[in-house]
Amino acid sequence: MGIVKFLVEDLRDKVFSEYKLQPRNSRGSNPEAEIFLVHNQGIYCMADCKHELSDRDSSIVYALGCNPNTDEMWLQTSRELVGGNDFCQAIPADWIEAAIIDESKYLEIKITDNEITLNKYP
């Protein structure tokens, strides 16, 4: 399979900000919030904070080369990176948070037949 690459700036502005959306007057984190890596129409990350103010669709960030709206070869690229089967898998928010804190340009996620792991954030 392959390594899926995301721009950290986009993840910060869309996915992580949605993930951290807190209920009003809340001091803690939202235990129901999750970040998903999805493969269906392209490959993307999205947040689901399960709060009434949440807008999951606005939190979508496509992997480089895998956006059906802008990348001509998105289908071929997506299949080369993760295969042909659709999936939706929760990933640790810590991966994105660490890349943001380290001011990395990219977040890379390695996908094999058996697992999804953080590759690096160069």
Image (cartoon, grey):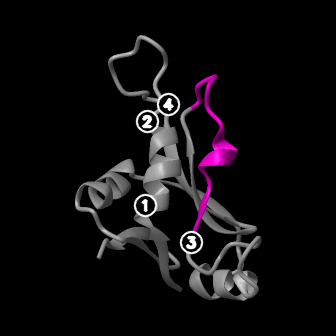
Point out residue 16 in the picture as x, y percentages from the top left corner: 45, 46
Q: Disc 1 versus disc 2: distance between alpha carbons?
A: 15 Å
- Nearer to us of marks 1 and 2 is 1
> Could you tell me which residue is drawn at 33 percent across and 21 percent down?
28
Residue 106 visible at all: yes
Q: Callout 4 environment at 10 Å: few (<14), some (14 to 19), or many (20+)?
A: few
Determine the secondary structure under disc 1. Answer: helix
Secondary structure under the numbered disc 3 in the rendered image: loop
Q: Which mark is residue 20?
A: 2
**Residue 32 placed where, x, y %?**
49, 31
Which kind of residue does numbered mark 3 sit on?
Ala
Q: Amino acid at mark 1?
A: Glu
Looking at the rendered structure, which numbered label has been put on residue 121?
Answer: none
User: Of 32 and 112, which appears nearest the observer?
Assistant: 32
Marks 3 & 2, CB-CB < 8 Å contact: no
Measure the C-alpha gap from mark 3 to mark 1.
12 Å
Secondary structure beneath dot 2 equals: loop
Q: Tag on residue 63?
A: 3
Magenta stretch holds residue 55: yes
Q: Callout 4, which amino acid?
A: Glu
> Which label sits in the foreground, 3 or 1?
1
Q: CA distance from mark 4 to mark 2?
A: 11 Å
Tell me the tag on residue 32.
4
Q: Which residues are magenta?
A: 50-63
**How many angstroms separate mark 4 from mark 3 (CA)?**
24 Å
Pinpoint residue 93: horizontal percent, then vertical percent: 39, 49
Q: Pointer 1: what residue?
A: 9
